[in-house]
Amino acid sequence: EALAKLLELKAQLGTNDGKQTFVLKTPKGTRDYNPKQMAIREKVFSTIINCFKRHGAETIDTPVFELKETLTGKYGEDSKLIYDLKDQGGELLSLRYDLTVPFARYLAMNKITNIKRYHIAKVYRRDNPAMTRGRYREFYQCDFDIAGQYDPMIPDAECLKIVHEIFSELQLGDFVIKVNDRRVLDGMFEVCGVPADKFRTICSAVDKMDKMPWEEVKNEMVAEKGLSPETADKIGEYVQLSGATELADKLLQDDKLSQSKVALEGLADMKQLFEYLTFLGVEDKVVFDLSLARGLDYYTGVIYEAVLVQNQADTQMQQNEHCEPVGVGSVAAGGRYDGLVGMFDPKNRKVPCVGVSIGIERIFSIMEQRMEASEKKIRTTETQVLVATAQKKLLEERMKLVAELWKHGIKAEITYKKNPKLLNQLQYCEETGIPLVAIIGEQELQDGVVKLRVVSTREEVDVARVNLIEEIKKRSCQS
Amino acid sequence: EALAKLLELKAQLGTNDGKQTFVLKTPKGTRDYNPKQMAIREKVFSTIINCFKRHGAETIDTPVFELKETLTGKYGEDSKLIYDLKDQGGELLSLRYDLTVPFARYLAMNKITNIKRYHIAKVYRRDNPAMTRGRYREFYQCDFDIAGQYDPMIPDAECLKIVHEIFSELQLGDFVIKVNDRRVLDGMFEVCGVPADKFRTICSAVDKMDKMPWEEVKNEMVAEKGLSPETADKIGEYVQLSGATELADKLLQDDKLSQSKVALEGLADMKQLFEYLTFLGVEDKVVFDLSLARGLDYYTGVIYEAVLVQNQADTQMQQNEHCEPVGVGSVAAGGRYDGLVGMFDPKNRKVPCVGVSIGIERIFSIMEQRMEASEKKIRTTETQVLVATAQKKLLEERMKLVAELWKHGIKAEITYKKNPKLLNQLQYCEETGIPLVAIIGEQELQDGVVKLRVVSTREEVDVARVNLIEEIKKRSCQS
């Protein structure tokens, strides 16, 4: 971050001595993606999209902005982070804050009661950016949601299965999926003596337990939010519990908690969820954690969050490399929101929904750091062959040959010089990783052949022009 | 459009009798994409991206908004269409108006002097939308650009080759690519007696010749922009010329035009361009058209625009279907802009650029109309097999089997009911186009088999459980 600030200052200074007065930068909290970063991004996307498709999801898209009122009253304390557009006459608009509210608006508007869809798009939050840790103001979300009236916990279990599959495939190291249920939290607040109108704000306080010690959270509850120290302490006992299905059993027997009807419902569903997770083979990474609360208002049932578990080896490696360690934080989160669609429906018809959102930027940060550390070269193009020449005045022949290759679906290039040097053409291949060069000269044209050179081995063979396409395709398959 | 207005009114009325006061719609000039529309969109994108990759392009991405000052002074009369963000403290931001200016900013900021890149992303214009004709306020651009100091017209010719390849592959009907050169236009204005400070505004007038008759354009030049009628008439003679390389030859001999140095440069390059287009095999669709002017300020050399040529048969079909005909308009446009990067560089270092932008929304409109007319069913998921049962209490077995299929990369689903009816499960396959059903019951479990049913033929065979993955893969390849 210090570096980023210096670069920013430098950019400002750099423009003052020219005729221009503007700063050459992207807006605060945003970034460009260069071709290498795009190659990483596309790899991550393809893993995620393949998983979503494997689970039978369709995809939709919505505009980057919504009517301001569509977003109003959905995000609780976070609403202040919404970007508004300037009033230039016409409707008042805001940039989307997540993909869940636009999805609910889409369902209500089109009266859809059943859908399994994914949506990958950028969302916008006027938050304090921490870009080295993958926290941006413009960032991607990859959302998978199941809407429809189904039997309890079956779609919920599939969402967790998807998180498990994606983070197993991405190989970012070990991970844990914490689960909890808003009904268990509400029941807990109830039996601990929290007034009903403080449930959501106390929920927000509990949500901070992964970032600050319990004493500070307690202080927020007592000093800022007006709980009695005794009530806070009771909550404190519960939220330090974590386990699996046996914890649900224990809590079902809990003298206090079993007094709450909603808590019992939540706990019964939690037991059911763990059973399904066992059938799906993913119970190993899932932890029932009473301190998980999630910030957003709209959740009504099960909630979850995946975190990467940084192991000792990784941390050491990063320190040795003198790079700031990538913060270990939430990389996926979601839950059940059965009331949100109804908020958009004139007749308040409910469409139960459950979903998960994969946070891509932190994954990118980790993969980028790894890629840099490994010094492995990433190709940013897919060009199979460069059409080249060692002689002058052969642009016409190069153009005709490259057009022939394009026509047959071969990825090919020529350099944009009339009379390029062979050395420069070969260098271009080395730099960009093009594996083959198709060299033509007067002799080759006369003989009806093309000299095919393998860049890595410098081996050259004459290939009859009629066989060239086939030969390139064959060699591209092998590599 | 009338329909859209009615729907909007209805939506407004619909919310007034409920407890809500908000309108359930997307912002003016924007749309959602439903799963079918997404399937079409992804098909179009894949054709375009494949072409860009075939030509060796890398890809980049930039934020959806830029500093307001980055966009200032780049778009001439169109600047009024830029969306600004509200000042919420911090930087003043605007949504990007195209991908070209962010690209130039990216090059200058990163001091890049050579790159061939594509960028596919949404851009924003507060224009008057005409959505049935594919004119939106939020729309995709698919840009391909070549930056670098190269020999004249070689990258320019490749851009036209790309347009030719894409519109040939998309099979939207016949098309024409009009080309002209800003230097020819400027030379023409010069020799016709247009004052130099009126070149750009007269250029904007010429740009309207495809939308209004010459008399109206002339009137704008004379009455609004202060040209003498004689000067306008001289321009009128030139801008009605069109042809190919022989027109360039003719104009090189033109008594008046040959007095202009810039015109001669432009005409010589035009001849060169046509020669290269012949080598690349795409001269057949390219027309040198002196009335092509392009609205944007930043072009400095060759400019072009692709238009679809609507044939009689298409028009009739559309009328029979009672749908508004899709407007025949520009579907791709671009040109050379050698000065834009320099505008961002503190030392005004120039990076010559040439590029093309494919306009996707009009293509979507046409393909959507066609798809509706053909009544061909489009699948919106890729699910290969539904794991189903005819008996109760087999959710555990269904979950275990579907997890096994996912593990081996098979795209599979179960329905989210504890005890679903077989008929409902088969119906789900019919509706969503899932070709296979893997049916399990007590008997199958005992025998270690799965009943594999082909939805289309209703044929059923027992497959040993150990062979199931292989069998599904085999059948998916065949279909």
Image (cartoon, coloured by chain):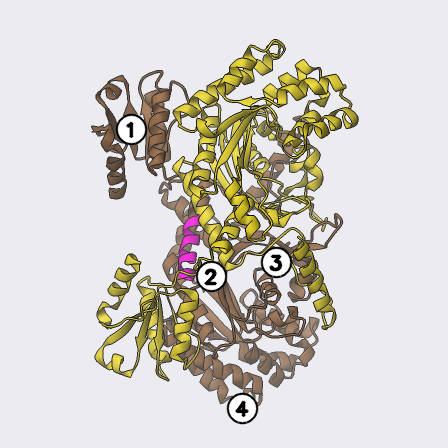
Chain colours: A yellow, B brown
- Mark 2 vs 1, N-terminal side: 2
| Cα distance in 3D space between marks 2 and 1 | 43 Å
Expressed as whole percent of the image width and height from the top left, the position of residue A437 reads 33, 70
- B170 vs B102, nearest the viewer: B102
Mark 4 to mark 2 CA distance (whole Å): 45 Å
**Image mark for residue B255:** 4
Label 4 to label 3, Cα distance in Å?
A: 41 Å
- Which element type, helix, strand or loop, lies under badge 1? strand
**Earlier along the polypeptide chain: callout 4 or callout 3?**
3
- Specify the principal SS of the magenta part: helix
Residue B431 sits in quarter: top left
- Give the image location of residue A266, x and y in percent: 55, 18
Tell me, yes or no, whether dots 4 and 2 are on the same chain: yes
Number of other residues with Cα within 10 Å of mark 2, as a class: few under 14, some 14 to 19, many 20 or more: many
Helix, strand or loop under label 4: loop
Relative to B69, is B7 above or below?
above
